[in-house]
Amino acid sequence: MKLTQLETPALVADEKALTGNMDAMSSLLEGSSLKLRPHYKSNKCARIAAMQMERGAVGITCAKLSEAEDLCDSGIEDILIANQIADPSKMLKAALLAGKCRLTVCVDSASNARLLSKAASAAGTTIHCYVEYDIGMRRCGVSTEEEFLELAKLTDSLPGLDFSGIQAYAGHVRHMAGSAERERETRANEAKLLSLKARLEEAGLSVGAISGGSTGTAVLKASGGVYTELQAGSYIFLDSTYGELESLPFRNSLYVLATVISVRPGLAILDAGVKAIGMDQELPVILGMDGERVDGRIAVNEEHLKLFDPSRELAEGETVMIIPGHCCSTVNLYDRIYLFDGERVSGRLEVSARGCSR
Ligand SMILES: Cc1ncc(COP(=O)(O)O)c(C=O)c1O
C-alpha cells in the first residue's frame, strides 16, 4: 500500500532513517566507555526497545512504573526508572517487578529511600538505586555533595536497596542552540560529577554508573569520558526542536501524515491539531510529499492546523508530512506507528506503552 493511502492523521516513520539513526548512535559510542541506556518515553514501542538492545544497549530507561512493567513484560531485563516513586502502593509494585528484572529507581530523599526499602524487604527483592544529583535542571535531585554522600550511604545500608550509581540528567542543556554553549555547560557538569565520584569513593562507596544525557549532548558525553550511561531517547526520530540544533549525527524519521481538508484564500487547513501533534515544544514543520518545506504562519487548534499564506499552493485532498515539535509527546497520541520505505508502507509498530503515564 502507498504511504499516501493511509487514513490521516497517521504517525509514520521512515524505516531507513529510523534504523540509520540507531546505527549512527552505535557508531558514535563504538570504542567509548559510554553505554547506551535509551529512554523509552520517546517511542513507547516494545519492538523499538528490542531493536535498541539488539544493537548493544545495556538496558532501557523509562520515566514511569507502568512503562517499566510494559518493558519487563516484553522481555527487557535491565530497566531504569529515571524518576522517584513516592506512592507506597506503587513502591510495592516496583518491589515485585524487581523480582522479574534488574530494576533501578532514582531516590533523592531519606524518607523515600526508607519507604522503598520497606517495600523491597516485604517483597524479598532488591531494588537498585541511583541517587539523583541536581546538576542545574532544578527538577528532582539533591544539590550538594554532602547531601548526596549521606543519602548514598543510607541507601547502601538499607535492606532491600543497593546504591548503584548517580543519576545526573542535565535537561536544561539538551536544547541549547549553540554547540559551544552546550559543550561549556556539559564539561562544567562533568567536573562536578568527578568531584562527587571522588568523594563517594573516598567514603568507600563504589559508583556503579553515572547516568544521564540526551540526544542533544550525546556527542559531548561520548567524548567526555565521565558519564557511563547515555539516556538519549529522541535520537531515533528527532523533531523540529532538535532540528534547530546544528551538528547532530541523526536525521528526522518521524512525521505526522496529514491531509489538506480545506483551502481558502491565503489559508490551508490540515486535519491534524493538538490531538495529533505534540505541541509542548516548538511549532511543527510542514513538508510536501516531495520533502520540500511549506512555510507559512501556523496556528494549531484541537483538530485543525491552520497554515496562513503557505509558501506554495496546497490542494484540497493533498497529503503533507508534518515534523512534530516534540517527538515524545506526539508518539503518546497514537496506538501505532506506520513504517514506510520510499512511497510504500513497509510495516507497523504497536505503541505498546501508549498512555502509560503512571
Ligand atoms: C531523565 C531523562 N533522561 C534523558 C532524556 C533525554 O531525552 P532526549 O534524548 O529525548 O532529549 C530525558 C528527556 O526528557 C529525561 O527526562
Image: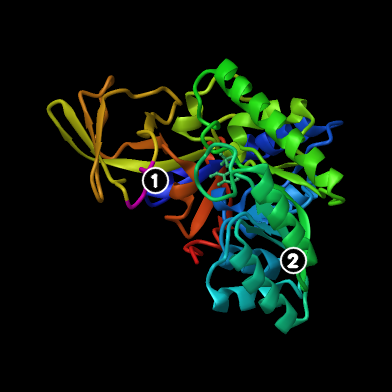
The residue that label 1 is drawn on is 278
Please name the residue shown 39% across and 38% down the image.
281
Taking the image in four quarters, ligand 1 sits in the one at top right
Which label belongs to residue 122? none
Q: Can you tell which quarter of the image residue 111 is in?
A: bottom right
- For the magenta stretch, what is the residue range? 275-280
Left or right, 83 with reference to 285: right
Quick check: 101 above or below 54?
A: below
Residue 198's spot in the image, x, y percent? 81, 38
Residue 276 is one of the magenta-drawn residues: yes
Residue 181's spot in the image, x, y percent? 55, 19
Which label belongs to residue 75? 2
Please name the residue shown 77% across and 47% down the image.
57
Quick check: 5 above or below 252?
A: below
**What's the amino acid at mark 1?**
Gly
| Residue at the far bottom in the pictured view | 122
Please name the residue shown 57% across and 74% down the image.
90
Residue 114 is one of the magenta-drawn residues: no
**What's the amino acid at mark 2?**
Gly
Residue 293's spot in the image, x, y percent? 39, 23
Q: Nearer the viewer, residue 262 or 164?
A: 164
